[in-house]
Amino acid sequence: MEDKNTEADLEARISATLAQVFPGVQLKHQRRFKIRLGHTEFETSGKGYVDGRADILVTRDDVPLAVVELKREGLALTKDDEEQGWSYAALAKAPLVIISNGADTRILLTHDQSTLHETSLGATELVQRLATAASLAQTSVNGAIERLLGADLGLPAVRAINSFELDELSGSWTDTKPFVSDFLVPRNVTETVRSTLCAPRPRAIVVSGAPLCGKSSVLRELVTTLPTAEGTALYLDGSACSEGLFRRLSNVLTALFGWPATLDQARHWLRQIAPDTRPPLVLCIDSPGAGPVLRSEIDEILSDTLGNVRIVVSLEEAEVDAWRLKSNRRELTRFGRNSEVVTVGHYNDTEFAAANLRLAELGGGLVHGASYAAELRAPWVLRAAVAPRMEDSSLTRNVVLPPTLGLETLEIAEDRFAQLGELRDSLERVARAFVELLDSSQPAELVMASLFDFYIGREWLRERVRPEELFALVQAGLLQPGTGVVAGPLYFVRVPALFATLVAERMQTLVAKRLGQSRNIHETAQWLVSRCSRMPFGDLVGAAVINHLMMNVHDLAGLRLLNALMQMPPATKVLSKGAKWVAVLPDVGVLDFELDADNNLVVQPRDGRLPPFKAPVEEDEMRAIASHDAWLILSQTRLFNLAFRHKNMSDDVNVAAWLLQEVATCPVVLRRIRKQMDDYHVHQIGEVEMPCAKLGIVEPVTWAIAELLSSEFFKDERDAWVLEAIRADNLPLLGRLTQALKHLQKVEDLGEWASEMLKIHCNPKWEHHPSFH
């Protein structure tokens, strides 16, 4: 009721004031009105009378006439009220300013801010004033802009700058710009930054991580979601700050608002919108260079000369020390003393679920099971993988996004880093050194750790790659020095998908050379598998080698190598007493295992942080998978468009169709291990190990079956392929076929066919299988 009374009182006061000042003149008034500053249009803040003052625009025949600053009764008129009203009038091109508290009314001319002695203007006088009103000088307009941007329009101005900066960096899915306009995944790191900003210290936060891990997106999220109660976030593209932060800010203020602000005016503007009495102004500087001007300006801000300002900077890992350490590397810079580093990595489970949900809202659905695909957890890989498909999505037509990428991972990396130039040549030499390292004897700890990351000893690499090349790769964020699981310094690769493409190229060369030397094909296959089994993305590297050889239709080397790998099937075996093995567990380290003579499993941590322990196990309980790396490679080959014909055969044989019929009979789960402990559930049915169907498609071979059966070129053969798979009476093949068909039930134009195949062929098989019950 009080609000309604206040509103009614305000309207009555407006009408009374206008009747007093303009007797007998027909006028209209707007309590919210728009003004344009340069290329930016603002709506007035609309402060209510309840706050002590209302800004009102008065028009006659839709022509601006006056800006009224109406104050509550009892509040004295001040020079600040006159300045505020004059600023709005100058920009609204209204010739008059009226300041009134009911008891006292003043009328000013906008063009020179002089006071009229008259307290009312009739129609005749009004026409005269309008006719003689002079246009404002540009300096006066600039003064009005400066005042309003630092007061009433400060927050809207910050939002306009953020939109200006972020819109310039945002585009479509297939654009080369860093952001997709309507796609932003909430990151846990953003919440960490927000909570840190709520504390009095530190004054600055560094968001760091591997290349393309989403550092810039964290700043974008912070800017677009930070509640005004916690602060006002201002985003600046750091790559445009080569001449300094204030120069960039003055350029933006000129471009957006038509205010040619000097560097000192830009400083003063920041000071106006960041007083100590408010929540902080958070300057988010995205990927700045290390220019001395910018660094000195940030030091100036950290010295508290500009008010309550915090700084959030996104930096590549290799740049962090240069910002936080002095050249002697013993002392911290001012920025280092006042900053804290937070690290952003690949999507965790919560973040990936949020990404999946947002993709679904935009018309793209990741196939169930995608959360287990490690490659899709890299933000840049996920975007590149879904980009061409999302471009075809719509509100009426959803697109299918794959649950695993396979060789597409390498293609995406090759395309994304196509502009590396000489850096690519240097990284290629590192890849050659890595492949050479695989032929050498290495400690078991390093061999195990290398299943997850590309590690290379520093001395080994420095003997084969020039120091200046290594330095350039470190500066580019592609390599990072450090220590690993063995004594001695190491380099490890920060963009493993890209490095895997270069390793694959080198392996192709070496395999072709070995075959050219008339090496035994089985020996070559074993050589390829043994090396691929000791590296990240090894299954993709091996598949890339196979695919490369298969493309040479004049040479059967690829097909012979394919057959050799087929003759290296995986199997499970029972570990006998006395068996020993080594494992690396994340966050635990290297563990030695032994099955002793009393059938106890003895576990001995190597670093001594945990005491050794043992536990009894049942006879024949301990099983291990004999190497399944050959069939892991085969499950990734995707040779859908190749066919061959034997001299005794009348029809072509589709390579993928034949290959999948064999590989899908594998009695163990066919997926490479991840650094994180996989939490998917596996069913053990006799000697067969199968992933739980509720997990979705988690094996590349299952997705390959779904792709084969949905391919248009395979349309006439899919029924026969399903029948042949059923006749094989093989439980793993049946399980993978069933999972692929369950996915195809949800695919447009294939759902009815897939449902029929399940009902007629698969379901009866399951019902008669002992495992069904």
Image: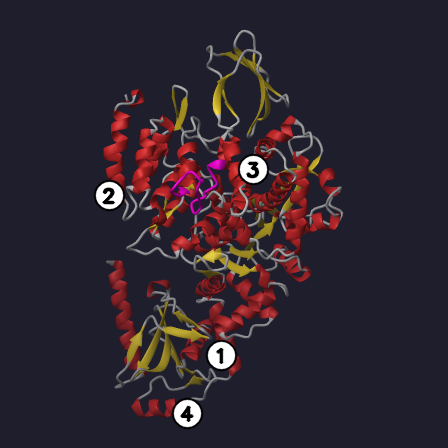
Q: In the rendering, at what x and y percent does residue 719 appear?
A: 29, 40
Find disc 4 in the rendering and name its residue: 132
Three-letter amino acid code at disc 4?
Answer: Thr
Q: Which residues are magenta?
A: 634-653
Q: Which residue is mark 1?
A: 141
> Quick check: can you spot residue 691?
yes
Of tags 4 and 3, the one toward the viewer is 3
Q: In the rendering, at what x and y percent does residue 294 appear?
A: 64, 60
Quarter of the figure with residue 26: bottom left
Amino acid type shown at disc 1: Val
Q: Picture coordinates of residue 346 (x, y %)?
A: 50, 43
| Residue at image point 51% right, 59% down | 235
Per the image, label 1 sits on a secondary structure element best described as: helix
Query: Is mark 1 in CB contact (under 8 Å) with mark 4?
Result: no
**SS at mark 4 in the image:** helix
Which residue, given by chain and number where applicable, does mark 3 sit on? 536
- Of marks 3 and 1, the one in the foreground: 3
* Type of amino acid at the residue the image marks with label 2: Glu
Q: In the rendered structure, does residue 649 fall within the stretch colored magenta?
A: yes
